[in-house]
Amino acid sequence: MFRFDSPILPFDDLPTTEQQAILLRRRFANAAEILKRVINFDVPPLTDEDLVLNAEELFLALDEQEADYQ
């Protein structure tokens, strides 16, 4: 835990638990920012037709890749 009387150390010199805590806080901050942006993102829902077309394109692309390996 950070104390105001602690010396400031380079990240690599911190104990592993402190490094992990810093990285975890950074990940949560990034995730929170992404969620803030996504919540207000207005996207129309996908129709069944959209999903089928996307699936067909994906399977065709995978079939082509598979054919290249044979």
Image (cartoon, rainbow, N blue to C red):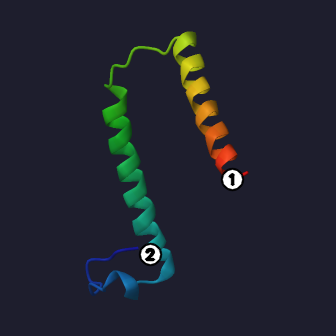
As displayed, is residue 31 above or below residue 12? above
As displayed, is residue 35 above or below residue 8? above
Residue type highlighted by circle 1: Tyr
- The quadrant in which residue 44 appears is top left
Q: Residue at x 30, y 86 (%)?
A: 9
Disc on res. 34 = none
Q: Residue at x 38, y 88 (%)?
A: 13
Q: Residue at x 51, y 16 (%)?
A: 50
Find the distance from the CA under tag 1 to the CA under tag 2.
Answer: 47 Å
Neighbourhood count class around disc 2 (C-alpha, 10 Å): few under 14, some 14–19, many 20 upward: some
Q: Residue at x 26, y 77 (%)?
A: 4
Q: Earlier in the sequence, mark 1 or mark 2?
A: 2
Residue carrying label 2: 18
Relative horizontal placement of residue 47, taking residue 42 as reference (left or right) = right
Residue carrying label 1: 69
Q: Are marks 1 and 2 in contact (CB under 8 Å)?
A: no
Place of residue 62 in the rendered image (x, y in percent of width and height, measured from the top left) = 63, 39
Relative horizontal placement of residue 55, taking residue 39 as reference (left or right) = right
- The quadrant in which residue 67 appears is top right
